[in-house]
């Protein structure tokens, strides 16, 4: 297991990626904020699968200040570069890019990237400026690495859709790939923020995969009324979760609101955001396409 090279400056990453491209090799890129877990490693392994053994797999580790609101967890977000580099070695990553804030936001910086309608529902109103911060930093990371393919977790479903749209709208020559959510044995989606949970909150947080699973089961039994599907998911959350930001069923491609009854063939994503203790958790499932995240008793 060889340790990845750690690069700090955008110039160094650009040079490394240029060199790979000049040799005719693909560059696969995984943007992260660090605190890496198996979900991130799954993205890096996908990247390796796509560019092959000879290609270049780069992971960025950058806690991006512009995507955090003033009362969010920017200052306490876990930072442990040595641990992240060790995890990247497990997934045979070639390069870890860990820039300073000033390198990504040069003095006098005044440019932001905003994706329209896809940023507006779900987390949009609850985290003003969040997707603009994400879109801005990912555009800059793409401008530096110029990858042919980039990987994002589908747990952050709206983020994935926003970034896919961004690449298409800006005519960027990068394929944005969404990779399936990695879950703990009890169904809880892996997230860097799970480490904020106390053991009690961790236990209660299993209400999230149970909520999604109940909706998956109802859909499989033929339920197509949107309010009923949302209602199935709300029940365990209302019982166990101190604060529910949203439980919503949306068009899986556009994130638009859906009619009262799902039309045949309309793809729908059930998305959930809740707070447990100090952690805000999000999760989702595309009905009819993904299995239940955990086992649930049939009603
Ligand atoms: O999903 C994340 O970790 C971040 O939002 C991203 C895409 C790396 C941008 O900072």
Image (spheres, helix red, strand yellow):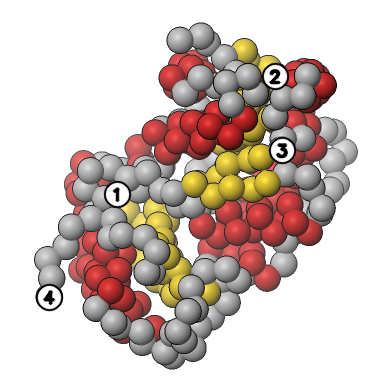
> In the picture provided, is 22 more to the left or to the right than 50?
right
**Residue that appears at 82% across and 53% down:** 171
Residue count near mark 2 (Cα–Cα under 10 Å), binned few <14, some 14–19, many ≥20:
some
Please report whichever mark, 1 or 4, sits nearer to the chain's N-terminal start.
Answer: 1
Residue bearing the label numbered 3: 148
Q: Are marks 1 and 4 in contact (CB under 8 Å)?
A: no
Please report whichever mark, 4 or 2, sits nearer to the chain's N-terminal start.
Answer: 2
Closer to viewer: mark 4 or mark 3: 3
Please report whichever mark, 2 or 3, sits nearer to the chain's N-terminal start.
Answer: 2
Q: CA distance from mark 1 to mark 4?
A: 21 Å
Location of the N terminus by quadrant is top left
Task: Where is residue 264? Give x, y as percent.
Answer: 45, 84
Q: CA distance from mark 2 to mark 3?
A: 21 Å
Task: Where is residue 153? Give x, y as percent.
Answer: 50, 46
SS assignment at label 3:
loop
Q: Is residue 98 visible?
A: no
Please report whichever mark, 4 or 3, sits nearer to the chain's N-terminal start.
Answer: 3
Q: Are marks 4 and 2 in contact (CB under 8 Å)?
A: no
Q: Is residue 249 visible?
A: yes
Q: Are marks 4 and 3 in contact (CB under 8 Å)?
A: no
- Which mark identifies residue 11? none
Name the foreground residue: 70 vs 94: 94
SS assignment at label 1:
loop
- Would you place residue 78 above or below residue 279 in this image? above
Closer to viewer: mark 1 or mark 2: 1
**Residue that appears at 52% across and 69% down:** 252
Residue bearing the label numbered 2: 8
- Which mark identifies residue 188? 1
Q: CA distance from mark 4 to mark 2?
A: 54 Å
């Amino acid at each position: 297991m060889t340790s990845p090279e750690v690069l700090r400056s955008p110039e160094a990453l650009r040079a490394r990626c240029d060199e790979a491209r000049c040799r005719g090799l693909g560059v696969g890129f995984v943007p992260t904020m660090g605190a890496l877990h198996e979900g991130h490693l799954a993205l890096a392994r996908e990247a390796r699968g796509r560019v092959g053994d000879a290609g270049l797999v780069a992971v960025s580790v950058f806690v991006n200040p512009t995507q955090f609101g003033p009362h969010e967890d920017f200052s306490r977000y876990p930072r442990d570069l040595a641990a992240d580099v060790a995890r990247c070695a497990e997934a045979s990553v070639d390069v870890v890019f860990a820039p300073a804030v000033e390198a990504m936001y040069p003095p006098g910086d005044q440019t932001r990237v905003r994706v329209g309608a896809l940023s507006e529902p779900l987390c949009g109103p609850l985290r003003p400026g969040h997707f603009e911060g994400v879109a801005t930093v990912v555009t800059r990371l793409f401008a530096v690495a110029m990858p042919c393919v980039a990987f994002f977790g589908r747990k952050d479903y709206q983020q994935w859709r926003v970034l896919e749209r961004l690449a298409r709208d800006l005519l960027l020559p990068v394929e944005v790939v969404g990779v399936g959510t990695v879950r703990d044995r009890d169904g809880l989606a892996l997230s860097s923020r799970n480490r904020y949970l106390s053991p009690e909150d961790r236990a209660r947080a299993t209400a999230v995969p149970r909520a999604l699973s109940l909706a998956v089961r109802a859909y499989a039994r033929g339920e197509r009324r949107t309010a009923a599907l949302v209602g199935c998911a709300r029940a365990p959350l209302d019982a166990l979760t101190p604060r529910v930001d949203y439980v919503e069923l949306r068009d899986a491609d556009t994130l638009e609101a859906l009619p009262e009854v799902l039309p045949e063939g309309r793809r729908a994503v059930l998305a959930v955001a809740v707070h447990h203790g100090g952690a805000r958790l999000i999760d989702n499932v595309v009905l009819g396409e993904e299995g239940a995240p955990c086992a649930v008793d049939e009603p």
